[in-house]
Structures are given as structure tokens and as C-alpha cells.
Amino acid sequence: MRATLLITVAAALFTGSAAAQVTLLSNATLIDGTGVLPQSNVTIIMERNRIADIVRHPAIIATPGATTVDLTGKFVVPGIINAHGHVGPTPRDPQLRQYARYGVTTTTSMSFDPDDIAEFKARQKTGELHGARILTVKYRFMSEPFVPGSENKTPGEARAKVDEIVAKGADFVKVWIDSQGGRRPKLTREFVSAVFDQARKHGKLTMAHIVELADARMVMDEGVNIIVHNVRDQEMPAEFLAALKARNVSVISTLAREEGMFVYGDEAPGFTDDPFFLQGLTPEQRVRLPAKRQEQAQEPGRPGMLRALEIDKLNVKRLADAGVRLGFGTDSGGESNRYFIQGFFEHRQMELMRQAGLTPMQIIQMFSKNNSEMLGIDKDFGTLARGKAADLLVLARNPLDNVANMRAIEAVYLGGRKFE
Ligand SMILES: [Zn+2]
């Protein structure tokens, strides 16, 4: 934190058109995502799309030409990065706008994206942001009978496909290893090995969808960077946790997804009456909600789903205590009848993480610092610091008192501009 505010702001103001793009968020309490204690009386200076500086007790509050927003009594936290989301199949912009309304400033798209995604991302990088920023796997390597996903049969075909999707804008390379409860074949180790090896040749981070501990071990041994769901068939043994930490493997737990598999079938309405949930539903989803509740109430697999959620929670705490890097993700989005509601699920995930035993500070670090480091975007995103993108949230209440206060969003700043 620096005290030399005058020079920074003056320089910004005298570069012509930049004048109108300087915004001072003053007198805020800042929780910057690094895990340090909140800092009061902070002024954040946003110039163009970045944080030009963060200062305490600034010498000047009213800077000619700059917009000043008084945030006395308010809290500023980093925008939420969602490291496991889905965008599509319907048009992107409404979904990215919905994420942003709920405070998600960056999301991932973890299955299939059409070829225009590369151009779409390029436009976002020039500042054309109508909603959350998007990062993509572009294509998901799956086993039969899933199409798309299982067209590539041999390691050679897998390598060629990696080359193709990287050329078409893939930020990460993902495999999907899931027997669907023993009903389907899984990708072979040989195939996964070829995909990961080819991804590394392109300098891309690798990701794996798994359910079982055995598959988590396999992908770890093949050098995976990020396991994008938690182990849900059993508690993780200590030696495995130690190995994950030693190999710098990150784990995303999608508790909101596990709960979303059965929660709508609960007798008590739970969150389904909550306006904060309902505002995230499309008109069609609102109409179909009673049918969804009925469908899940009759779901024969319900006991297994409840058990998976409980195991996931136990493993979250074990991972955190073992010092494994936990990423923040939800599996939100995708096919509309899943009811994995974009934006709402990220807030629900925070509450479930709290139930799993993490502190609000740990949860804030997960969606900012951890995710940006895990996804390799920490130079520009994640924590709030000088030089980084001005993606941040203004909250009316302190999220450290109760992580549900993350819902008290008064403003979302995306690239230094108020999102509305
Ligand atoms: Zn997913």
C-alpha cells in the first residue's frame, strides 16, 4: 500500500481521454483475497480497466475529473472466479450477464464451445465485456457413447485433437473419467496419458473430471494439474493427500453440484422459495420447478447422492487441513433442466464450504487467490492489488461475519466499470 496518490492520479488525468475513466472507491474496508486481515479507510484507484493504486487515508479525495464513490461502511472483495462452470448451449451473453449480476467476474466453460469462442475471447480482451470473462476447455475428451466427446479412439487421434482445440482457443485441456456408476466404459490410462502429454507440449494446464479415488490416483500419476470434482466414493487417505500436495495438484470440490442432484426433491422447500435463487431462473425454469421437485423426490439414486455430498464435504476439510490447493467451482450452467443455476450456485457453494468447515476468509481466498494461481491467470486476476484487473465487488455487509453476506452485492466492477 502506497501513500503517493497525487502523482499516480495526476498522471492518469493528464493523458487525455483517460480522465473520465479514473474512478476512486474511497473509505472502503478491503478484503483483498490474499488472506491478510481486512484494511479499513482504503481508497482504490481504478484507471481504465485496472487498479492503478490502493492507498490508505488518501491526501486528496476529490480529484478533478475523477469519479469518486464513497464506500464508507462498505466492503470490497475480489470478483468471484468460478473455475468449474458451463456456458452454453444457448447464447453466451445472457449467461455471462447472469454470472456477473451475482458477482462472478470470470467463469470457465468446461465442456464444448463452438468455434467462435476464440474470437469471442479476443473481443473480451479488448475490453468488450457484456458479462463475466470466459475461459474454456473448448472440447471435453469423454468415453463412449458420448458424442461429442468420444470421436477420438486412439492416442494418436487424441493428440491430433489436442492440437486442433488448442489452435481453436482452448485455455485448458480436460478429460472426463466417469463410469456413471459402473454402467459405462472409462477412458483408458493410455488415452489420458497421450492427451496430457500433448497438452503439456502446448504449455496448457490439464484437468480431469473424476468420481473415484482410483481415477484420481491415475490422473495424478499422469501429471494432471487440476482435478475438477472432488473424490466422492470414499474419504481420501493421508498418503494420497500428501502426494497431491507434493505434486502441486489442485482440487475443485463442486458441493453445489452434489447437492443440486437431489436438493429440489426435499420435502421442505429449502432455498427454492428464496428470491435470490428465483431471480436466477429463466421463465421456463420457474414454470417447470414443481416438476423438477417431483422428479428428484422420486429419484431412486437419492441415498447415494446424499452420501456423495457428505463424503465430498469430509474430503474438502481433509484437503484444506493437508494444505492441498483447493479451487473454487460449482458445475453451474449446462442443460437447463439440471437447475445448476449460474451465479446462485456460486453463493450456495460458499455456504456448503462453510458447512464443510472452511472459514469465510478461506472461501474468499479460494475464489480469488487460489483460483487465479491454479488457472495460471494470477498476473492479471485474483487478488486485488496494484496493476491487476479492476474486477471487484462492493458489499453492504462484512462477508467475514457470515459468508452469506457475499450476497449483499451493491455493485460489481468489471474491468474498472460498474456492471449494470
Ligand atoms: Zn462440469
Image (cartoon, rainbow, N blue to C red):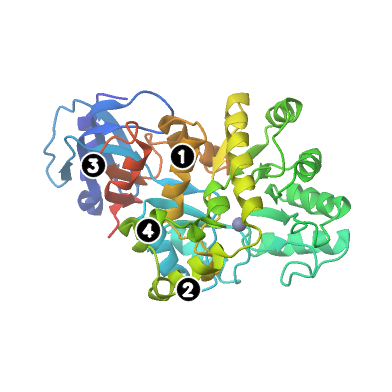
Query: Residue 273: where, in percent of width, then height?
Result: 35, 59
Spatial CA distance of label 4 from label 3 is: 19 Å
Using the image as rendered, state which of residue 49 and residue 235 is in the foreground. 235
Residue at 34% from the left image edge and 31% from the top image edge: 400
Quadrant where the image shows the N terminus:
top left
For the residues labelled 3 and 2, say whether their Cβ atoms are less than 8 Å apart: no
Residue flagged by tag 2: what amino acid is it? Pro
Give the amino acid type for the residue marked by disc 3 in the picture: Ala
Spatial CA span between label 3 and label 2: 32 Å
Question: In this rendering, does residue 229 appear at all?
Answer: no
Left or right: 274 as drawn, with respect to 349? left
Kindly state the secondary structure of the residue where label 1 is placed: helix
Q: Quickly name the residue at label 3.
A: 396
Which residue matches tag 2?
91
Q: Residues within 10 Å of mark 2 (few under 14, many from 20)?
A: few
Ligand 1 visible in quadrant: bottom right
First reached walking from the N terminus: tag 3 or tag 2: 2
Is disc 3's CB within 8 Å of ligand 1?
Answer: no
